[in-house]
Amino acid sequence: YIWPMWITLLLHLIAILLFTTGFLLTRTELPYYSHCSDVSQSPCFPSSPNNDSCWTKPSVNRLVIIVLDALRFDFVAPSSFFAESKPWMDKLQVLKNMSSSRPSSARIFKAIADPPTTSLQRLK
């Protein structure tokens, strides 16, 4: 009676190994960073002998991206985007008002994720 227990344990371990290596995403992170010396190789900036500048200055000091996972797009987007208005549309007015009052500072984007998703692994 010990053999079936060991075979069951071995099958469970193989199943867990296959699940963890195939189902969850592998995180790939690039170790490269740009430096000021890269400006000379960029086609965007003409090379000049007296080029003491670095990359262009950022237009903002800080950028905040808010991801609301599992929030339907039609809860947030104005009902004027859709041909038919539904009862659940235009209920989350905060994001709609923010994007319409400050269009240069707030935007609403629709993201489509391929299942299976594991959101924590996709965010850094």
Image (cartoon, rainbow, N blue to C red):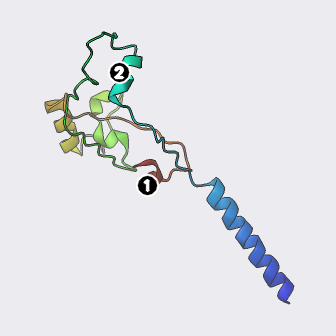
Give the answer, above or below, for where 5 lies relative to 101. below
In this view, the residue farthest toward the left is 101
In screen coordinates, is 5 left or right of 93? right
Q: Disc 1 residue type?
A: Leu
Residue at screen point 33% across, 10% down: 46
Residue 115 placement (x, y as % from top left):
55, 47
* Figure quadrant of residue 75: top left
SS for callout 2: helix
Q: Label 2 neighbourhood size at 10 Å, few (<14), some (14-19), many (20+)? A: some
Label located before the other in sequence (1 or 2): 2
Would you say 41 lies left or right of 8 here? left
Q: Secondary structure at mark 1?
A: helix
Q: Quadrant of residue 54?
A: top left
Residue at mark 2: 39
Query: Label 1: which residue?
Result: 120
Question: Is 49 in front, or is 79?
Answer: 49
Residue drawn at 41 percent across, 49 percent down: 123
The image position of residue 94, as x and y in percent, is 18, 44
Q: Position of residue 89 (x, y in %)?
A: 29, 41
**Residue 48, how many percent across, how many down?**
30, 9
User: Residues under labels 1 and 2: Cα distance?
Assistant: 34 Å
